[in-house]
């Protein structure tokens, strides 16, 4: 740190241009290049590397946070074998989806093979996250599609209880969507089953089905859903986002895991994500929500950022890198590692 100047040009290949090694880092980020079961647009497997490439372009100062870059964070190298496995499974998964979309019966043996491959990904994430947690690190994940954080959530839930704050356009409460046990559309269905997960609070939701509504209403743990259209109608009628946020935060337990699907934002901020939906949250409104989680005294015990697809330009990765920087910084504040002036 003696020779580090955060105002200098960021060095490519280093997350945010940071000087920290994995040994020095308090927070370790696990990149997961994976998009096997995506049911519309592909490309999120390229998200982690695109975010890493974009991240040194950020200016690191934030007006009400003292030297946010002092929270040590480093990213692992992406697993080449995992990326190759994702690539090898994507085409047969696409064939199955095509069969279903044509009203045909899917190849059950192919589905079983894909589920086995996805289980390998979940186990890899679980084992890697557990390794770094055993070393006293906080772990965050950069996807890949939204199926990728299940192994991290599982490893964390074996250690402590927490609630999930889900930023998303979708509920993701389908059971084995399209036959895939670890579908990107099934992440919260799988996560809420874990013993250590106390509740799920979903913000930005605007695309869901009857199956998900029925599960949400009958499951024996709390699933709080804040529908985007209901929130917007209240805002148009004069209600404040501040009051909505107070309500959202009040239902969260003391420890919070943030699961951030980039499609929770308005589509102009993530035009290349796999399943964009009109409506959504602004960058500033999500920042405000997460700040209020932290200023309430709650602790962020882990997080993921998923579904960033770089497309043909750098815009999605640029936005993704800025979302990631805020998640890293808010985690540091909640752990007492960074000083802040915000209320």
Image (cartoon, rainbow, N blue to C red):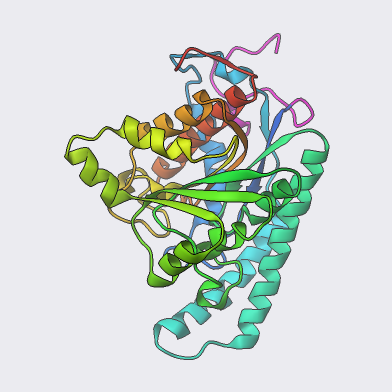
Q: Which residues are magenta?
A: 1-24
Q: Is residue 3 left or right of residue 305?
A: right
Q: Is residue 186 magenta?
A: no
Q: Is residue 76 left or right of residue 210?
A: right
Image position of 337 with respect to 120: above or below: above
Q: Which one is in front, 250 or 320?
A: 250
Question: To which quarter of the image does residue 63 belong?
Answer: top left
Is residue 2 covered in magenta? yes
- Residue in the image at 64% along x and 20% along y: 336
From the top left corner, tell me how far across and down residue 120 is, in percent: 73, 64
Picture quarter with the N terminus: top right
- Quarter holding the C terminus is top left
Front one among 305 and 161: 161
Locate residue 289: give its quadrant: top left
Tell me: residue 20, above or below residue 102. Answer: above
Q: Name the outermost residue toward the left.
A: 237
**Taken as a whole, is the magenta stretch helix, strand or loop?**
loop
**x 50%, y 31%: residue:** 293
């Amino acid at each position: 740190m003696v020779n580090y100047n955060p105002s200098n040009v960021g060095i490519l290949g280093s997350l945010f241009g940071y000087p920290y090694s994995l040994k020095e880092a308090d927070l370790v980020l696990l990149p997961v290049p994976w998009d096997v079961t995506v049911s519309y647009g592909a490309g999120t497997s390229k998200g982690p590397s695109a975010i890493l490439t974009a991240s040194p372009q950020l200016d690191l100062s934030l007006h009400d946070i003292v030297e946010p870059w002092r929270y040590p964070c480093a990213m692992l190298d992406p697993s080449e074998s995992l990326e190759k496995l994702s690539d090898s499974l994507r085409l047969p998964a696409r064939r199955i989806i095509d069969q279903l979309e044509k009203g045909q019966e899917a190849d059950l043996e192919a589905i079983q093979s894909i589920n086995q491959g996805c289980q390998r990904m979940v186990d890899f994430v679980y084992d890697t996250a557990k390794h770094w947690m055993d070393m006293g690190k906080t772990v965050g994940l950069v996807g890949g599609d939204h199926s990728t954080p299940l192994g991290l959530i599982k490893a964390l839930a074996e250690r402590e209880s927490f609630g999930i704050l889900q930023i998303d356009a979708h509920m993701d409460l389908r059971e084995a969507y399209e036959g895939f046990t670890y579908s990107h559309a099934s992440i919260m269905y799988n996560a809420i089953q874990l013993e250590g997960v106390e509740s799920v609070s979903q913000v930005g939701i605007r695309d869901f089905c009857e199956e998900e509504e029925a599960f949400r209403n009958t499951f024996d743990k709390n699933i709080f859903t804040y529908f985007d259209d209901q929130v917007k109608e209240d805002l148009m009628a004069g209600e404040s986002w501040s009051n909505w946020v107070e309500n959202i935060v009040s239902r969260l337990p003391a420890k919070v895991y943030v699961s951030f699907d980039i499609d929770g934002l308005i589509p102009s901020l993530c035009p290349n994500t796999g399943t964009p939906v009109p409506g959504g949250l602004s960058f500033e409104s999500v920042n405000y929500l997460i700040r209020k989680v932290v200023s309430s005294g709650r602790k962020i015990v882990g997080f993921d950022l998923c579904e960033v697809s770089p497309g043909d330009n750098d815009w999605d990765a640029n936005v993704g890198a800025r979302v990631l920087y805020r998640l890293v910084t808010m985690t540091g504040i909640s752990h007492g590692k960074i000083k802040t002036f915000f209320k």
